[in-house]
Image: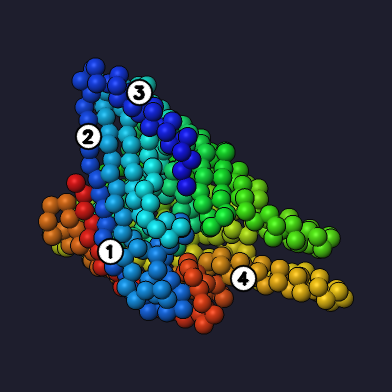
Amino acid sequence: MLHVPRRAAALAIVLAFAQTGAQAQAKWTFGGFGTLAAVHSSEHQADYMASPLSPGKAGYSKDVAFDVDSRVGAQLGVQFDRRWSAVVQVVQEQTISDGYEPRLEWANVKFQVTPELSLRAGRIALPLFLAADYRKATYALPWLRPPVELYSLMPITNSDGIDASYRWSAAGFKHETQLSVGHATVRLARGVKGESNTVVGLTHNATSGALTLRATLAHAGFKVTGAEPYFDAFRSFGPPGQALADRYDIASRDVRVASVGFNYDPGDWFLMGELGRVNTRSLLGDQTASYLSGGYRFGTVAPYFTYAFVRSNMARREAGLPVAGLPPPAAALATVLNEELNYRLRRVASQNTASIGARWDFAPNYALKVQLDRVKPQRGSEGTLNNVQPGFQSGRAFGVISVGVDFVF
């Protein structure tokens, strides 16, 4: 969630430059994007979602849900002169608080130091994956949604800070190297907030003709508030509980992200893929995910396929606190703590999805997309599902049907 002071500060910076730019005949641009999509899931013991920060209700809660992918966004940009520019982007979509809320996605000022070097300050997109800059503006994507297995690993899409980008050429490729430093805050659940004061990322893009290559390394000192009583309860059981709390506590951890990807798009067809790992060194998970996708364009119609998977690099079950010999009240508490720990371990997703779909650009700035997914949570995991009910069975595949219209203006 946004901190009002930071949001106001970012907007104030942009408005201040806007006032200055008005005197120099600044060039303004305004546009927007949106998606209206309906989703049906055949898994009736859980809800299908595309992002843990924007959970939909297709499956158990609703037979057909419109909140999985639907959103709308608007963007205001200004070019003050050859060097100074600014942009503000607001997106309204489903939030973890069960409602649609506007979010300030971008609000930054850019200074073009030289033709090769640029600097930005403010709220900036985190450049972790290939579609980082436009993952919410899905009109720019071939699919109805980015592959859930990879893009849900790091659902945080922006940070407040600075970045520097340098463009150069070598070996037949055009290169861009980006260094970013910032701060990010996110609500993980009701009453549980995650915050990082030290998001440091290094991203490198290389393009040659139709080929784009990308690699990213990022590190964040991540702090989560709201779960302290649970891990303190483990520590009250002495050394065994202390060891478990030290291993899984989410209060303060170093999170590491690594990803590589490619996109080859000569025009008539495309092939792209990514591989990433996010390790939180805590109960929030250590996972590896990847996808491969391709498609062919027949005029305004483009069928495509995608195969994606995510795997947990953690144990699926933990023996937990020893219960034998404890007094009945302590044994009951230890049992509850162990059950909750193993439930959370099952929530660390292992899953694969095979998808086919098609995009039809039926009018300028409008695209109709239909996508069929076969999703299979594995290894006792609940996959990327939400609101899981007692009757859910891991290892059982289910289908997801999605129909949506993307648009830009």
Disc tally is 4
| Mark 1 residue type | Ala
Indicate which disc residue 16 carries. 3
259 lies above or below 30: below
Mark 1 lies on residue? 37
Q: Residue at x 26, y 53 (%)?
A: 34
Name which of mark 1 and mark 4 comes first in the sequence: 1
> Would residue 364 appear left or right of 354 to someone viewing this image?
left
Q: Residue at x 38, y 32 (%)?
A: 11
| Mark 3 residue type | Ala
Give the image location of residue 192, x and y in percent: 57, 54
| Mark 4 residue type | Tyr
Separation of marks 4 and 3 at Cα, in angstroms: 50 Å
| Mark 2 residue type | Thr
Separation of marks 1 and 3 at Cα, in angstroms: 38 Å
Give the image location of residue 200, x and y in percent: 53, 38
Name which of mark 2 and mark 4 comes first in the sequence: 2
Give the image location of residue 77, x and y in percent: 27, 33
Indicate which disc residue 29 carries. 2
Name which of mark 1 and mark 2 comes first in the sequence: 2
Tag 1 near tag 4, CB within 8 Å: no
Secondary structure found at label 2: strand
Q: Quadrant of residue 231?
A: bottom right
Separation of marks 1 and 2 at Cα, in angstroms: 27 Å
